[in-house]
């Protein structure tokens, strides 16, 4: 998700949010009045990379902050037996995702629901969680609770895939940027063992070539012990 807020006085895009995160109401307002900048009509390239690597083979999958459903549908099409629960806080987004799922013929395996990820999480039965641009919208206050929901949605050993804006992205518009160290610290503090962090791009309608971001794969469980 990205932030479409504009300054009412100048029309300029304000700087990215910091510790306060993106106000929750922003997403409701954006979907109601216009097409969101993060809705490109296709799955994120980083999600397609994860599909090619086989990162979604262990199900069921929980898509946290599914938006209009492009990522969940692409994963379902790539894995014909995978069950997916995809949620978003904005009813309009979920309605659009459900329509798209029916058109794609995956509605028997992909369930789209409304849920506030600051407080609502699924049962701990999932083999994988996808966060394609969600963690970076939360405030410092809300982020630990959200990451706990992601952690608790997974079976022991389950994998979480995160796509998060990087501090290397300096163009205006969008959510909070996270440095590699801050990102790793937040994920590990939630009880994950990080497998990989790499540079990627998050595609939006406002960032030519995609916004500089991180692609993270982490597993539920204690941090690895350094034997050295």
Image (spheres, rainbow, N blue to C red):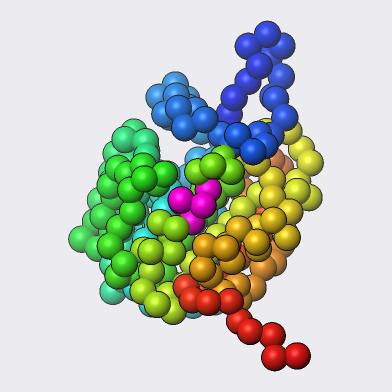
Q: Residue at x 69, y 50 (%)?
A: 178
- Magenta-drawn segment: 143-147
Instruction: Give how far across and how far down residue 92 sits, in percent.
Output: 34, 33
Q: Is residue 184 left or right of residue 73?
A: right
Residue 55 visible? The answer is no
Hey, which quadrant is residue 2 in on the image?
top right
User: What residue sits 69% from the left and 45% below the top?
Assistant: 177
Q: Picture coordinates of residue 205 (x, y %)?
A: 61, 38
Note whether 64 is above or below 4 in the view shown. below
Q: Main secondary structure of the magenta part?
A: helix
Q: Residue furthest bottom?
A: 227
Q: Is residue 14 left or right of residue 76?
A: right
The C terminus - image quarter: bottom right
Residue most extreme to the left: 108
- Could you say where residue 98 lies in the image, as x and y percent from the top left? 28, 46
Give the camera-side residue of 127 and 37.
127
Q: Which residue sits at x=28%, y=47%? A: 113
Q: Residue 168 location, x and y as percent?
A: 78, 50
Between 94 and 108, the residue placed more toward the observer is 94
User: Residue visible at 60% across and 34% down?
Assistant: 20
Picture mark count: 0
- Relative to 17, say whether 68 is above or below: below
In the figure, residue 183 lies in which quadrant? bottom right
């Amino acid at each position: 998700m990205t932030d479409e807020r504009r300054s009412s006085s100048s029309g300029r895009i304000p700087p990215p949010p910091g510790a306060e995160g993106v106000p929750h109401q922003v997403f409701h307002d954006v979907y109601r009045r216009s097409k969101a900048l993060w809705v490109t009509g296709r799955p994120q390239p980083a999600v397609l990379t994860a599909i090619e690597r086989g990162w979604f083979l262990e199900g069921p999958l929980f898509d946290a902050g599914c938006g209009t459903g492009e990522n969940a549908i692409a994963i379902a099409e790539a894995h014909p037996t995978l069950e997916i629960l995809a949620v978003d806080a904005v009813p309009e987004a979920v309605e659009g995702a459900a329509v798209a799922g029916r058109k794609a013929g995956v509605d028997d395996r992909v369930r789209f629901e409304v849920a506030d990820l600051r407080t609502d999480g699924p049962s701990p039965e999932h083999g994988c969680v996808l966060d394609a641009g969600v963690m970076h919208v939360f405030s410092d206050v809300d982020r630990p609770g959200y990451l706990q929901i992601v952690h608790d949605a997974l079976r022991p050993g389950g994998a979480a895939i995160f796509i998060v804006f990087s501090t290397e992205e300096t163009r205006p518009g969008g959510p909070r940027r996270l440095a590699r160290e801050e990102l790793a610290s937040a994920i590990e503090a939630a009880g994950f063992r990080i497998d990989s962090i790499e540079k990627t791009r998050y595609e939006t309608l406002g960032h030519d070539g995609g916004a500089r971001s991180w692609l993270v794969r982490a597993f539920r469980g204690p941090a690895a012990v350094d034997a050295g």
